[in-house]
Image: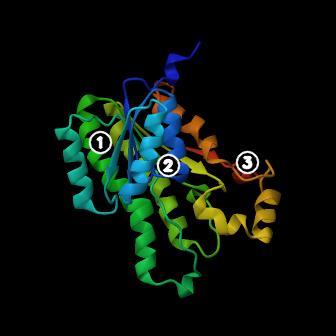
Amino acid sequence: MNNPLFSLEKRTALVTGSSRGLGLAIATGLAEAGAAIVLNGINADRLEESAARLRDRGFAVTAAAFDVTDEASVVAAFERFDAEKLQIDILVNNAGIQYRKPIVELDSANWQRVIDTNLTSAFLVSREAAKRMLPRKRGKVVNIGSLMSGLGRATVAPYTAAKGGIKTLTQSMAAEWAEHGVQANAIGPGYMLTDMNQALIDNPEFDNWVKGRTPSKRWGKPEELVGAAVFLASDASNYVNGQIIYVDGGMSAVI
């Protein structure tokens, strides 16, 4: 028998950056738990292809192509949701990019691009979602952080700054919204088998480092984020607020 605490039936989840990769895996898992899904991305064709595959499985899916780093686009998207009577009950801020360069070689444009995509977008989309959630006294915000939410690594300074910001932004959301019935939490993935990490996966030295450094001795699979996402999106986590759950094979637990 399915535990109703983890059911997402009669709820709608918006997952940003969900046309592929971690976002699509999370969106699929939320759909399997009963949620209607709003996929988001900036490539409309790829977004619709992913939406069609989920619809073929019988899931209720809307494709919403808008740029989460552009304030006007985010506001307009939520105004469209309102007009279409599409109520966002669950928000997963997943959109993210990586840019690897030593700090002394890093230009400000690429710094800002990573910060805007990985951190500012979570602020913009969460603000609009919360404006609708707070009056209803119900809602879930799940921010996708990283191992780098609490750790540093060479050549990824803008990413670590953004993901560290995600952790503390999540805590600020909890501080402001918890009393209104809205929970904000985060997931910190470890090294995952994604397109964004493909160059690292294909690098034998780095691949061996990940496997040697991780107690589980392997890379994570995108679908292994689903359990934490469903938990944080469901009634099972109604008294969990401002936390980050690391899904990293144990990497952050050891020296």
**Mark toward the viewer: 2 or 3:** 2
**Mark toward the viewer: 2 or 1:** 2
In this rendering, is residue 44 above or below 27?
A: below
Say left or right for 153 vs 250. Answer: left
Check contact, mark 2 vs mark 3: CB within 8 A. no
- Number of numbered callouts drawn: 3
At which x and y percent is residue 71? 26, 60
Q: CA distance from mark 2 to mark 3?
A: 22 Å
Foreground residue, 107 or 26? 26
In this rendering, is residue 242 above or below 10?
A: below
Q: Earlier in the sequence, mark 1 or mark 3?
A: 1
Q: CA distance from mark 2 to mark 1?
A: 20 Å
State the mark number for residue 23: 2
The residue shown at (48%, 23%) is: 7
Which residue does the numbered mark 3 point to in the structure image? 250
Q: Amino acid at mark 2?
A: Gly
Q: Amino acid at mark 3?
A: Gly
Q: Find the residue positioned furthest to the bottom.
A: 105
- How packed mark 3 is, by other alpha carbons closer than 10 Å (few <14, some 14-19, many 20 or more), is some
Say left or right for 177 vs 232. Answer: left
Q: Earlier in the sequence, mark 2 or mark 3?
A: 2
Say left or right for 250 vs 241. Answer: right
Which residue does the numbered mark 1 point to in the structure image? 130
Q: CA distance from mark 1 to mark 3?
A: 32 Å
- How packed mark 2 is, by other alpha carbons closer than 10 Å (few <14, some 14-19, many 20 or more), is many
